Amino acid sequence: MSGGLRVDVALGDRSYPVAVGHGVAGQLPALVPPGARRAAIVTQANIAFADRVDPRIEHRRFEIGDGEAHKTLTTVEQLCRQFSQWGLDRNDVVIGVGGGLVTDVAGFAAAVYHRGIPVVHVATTLLAMIDAAIGGKTGVNLPEGKNLVGAYWQPSAVICDLDALHTLDAREMACGNGEMAKYHFLTGEDLLALPLAERVARCVAIKGEVVAADERESTSNPRGRALLNYGHTLAHALESAGHYDMRHGEAVAVGLLYAAELACVLGRIDAGRVARHREVLGVYGLSAALPAWAESDVLIERFSRDKKAVHGTTFVLDGPDGLEVVAGIERAALDAAMSRMERS
Ligand SMILES: NC(=O)c1ccc[n+]([C@@H]2O[C@H](COP(=O)([O-])OP(=O)(O)OC[C@H]3O[C@@H](n4cnc5c(N)ncnc54)[C@H](O)[C@@H]3O)[C@@H](O)[C@H]2O)c1
Ligand SMILES: [Zn+2]
């Protein structure tokens, strides 16, 4: 195999390698499961990097639409029907080439097609490289909410070829930084001090370790996979209330500051620690202000529908011992934290 970095996600007999670096897409043929005769490449029309992806077995390209409105069961049905018409069988492989939307949809289609066929992800956005393509959560949206239907389906391998990022615009890079800021608070590391390849590999390793310890996000583990939802409760509400005009990583940035304000209202952290959140988000080039259209009541109403809610409203919050899952948060605290947020 040619250079680059390699991180392993340790899940016993379902462990897999993640290749990170410039040009690592060249490793794809070696990472395709040995029995596969055909590869269904799932991508989007505007992802030029897909032309550089060659599994060196018979393959065909299947394009899905761009934007959260296409992250649906209908898209998955269309893909599965196209796979079937082509004759893809259960020993073959799906290759998702794209951002988190493509890897979520391709992964879910692979999870359900013939009750599950192998999938390899070639992540082409920073967000997909450090988060979405790693860890085996796949799924689609319903009109009632984001990611409400899905499956755990681990990939056989993930490729994070940094060459793909050359065509990614600044807004999408900022979105990746939103998730990166999340890892920053999870471990307290200064990830920006690392060169890009090492930074991406470190994020992959952080996520991989959390996933390896708690693959299916058990609700009884307050320091398990659920911690990866830091900043996400408000983020999901913002995304769905705004009909997905806000990008996921942008919404996560706002959600991180709201979670910090909420932790402060609850006396878990002090104002200095909230200020530190604002500062880190600034260093990552992110805005932490609530968009002007967002109504506090509407957002709070949506929290209670968040699929992570266990008893009352549940948030991942910072505290004296770091991040943990906190259940049963009262409405008054949610309102108080909301009133502390800046508006753009
Ligand atoms: N499964 C998980 O664990 C997990 C984690 C985080 C996010 N997600 C999901 O990921 C999705 C967000 O992913 P995203 O931020 O990558 O968005 P995305 O997949 O929608 O991609 C953003 C845009 O960038 C384009 N694009 C992709 N690669 C490109 C490239 N190399 N050059 C130029 N343009 C390119 C896409 O076509 C799209 O227009 C959400 O649906 C979210 O729910 C899943
Ligand atoms: Zn996320």
Image (tube, rainbow, N blue to C red):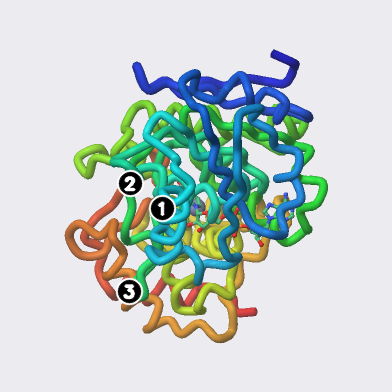
In contact (CB < 8 Å): disc 1 and disc 2: yes
- The residue under label 2 is which amino acid type? Val
**Mark before the other along the chain sequence, 1 or 3:** 1
| Mark 1, secondary structure of its residue | helix
Residue extending farthest to the top is: 1
Distance from disc 1 to disc 3, alpha carbons, whole Å, reads: 23 Å
Residue 324 visible = no
Which residue is disc 1 drawn over? 80
**Mark before the other along the chain sequence, 3 or 2:** 2
Provide residue 43's location: percent of width, then percent of height.
61, 51
* Residue 195 placement: quadrant: top right
- Which residue is found at the position 78% from the left and 58% from the top? 169
- Tell which of 146 and 275 is nearer to you: 146
Provide residue 55's location: percent of width, then percent of height.
64, 30
Which residue is disc 3 drawn over? 144
Provide residue 293's location: percent of width, then percent of height.
55, 86
Which residue is disc 2 drawn over? 112
Report the side of 33 relative to 28 (left or right).
left
- The residue under label 3 is which amino acid type? Glu
**Mark before the other along the chain sequence, 1 or 2:** 1
Crowding at mark 3 (Cα within 10 Å: few <14, some 14-19, many 20+): few
* Residue 313 placement: quadrant: bottom left
Image-quarter location of ligand 1: bottom right
Residue 120, placed above or below residue 29: below
Distance from disc 1 to disc 2, alpha carbons, whole Å, reads: 9 Å
Report the side of 78 relative to 171 (left or right).
left
| Mark 2, secondary structure of its residue | helix
Foreground tag (3 vs 2)? 2
Report the side of 59 relative to 54 (left or right).
left
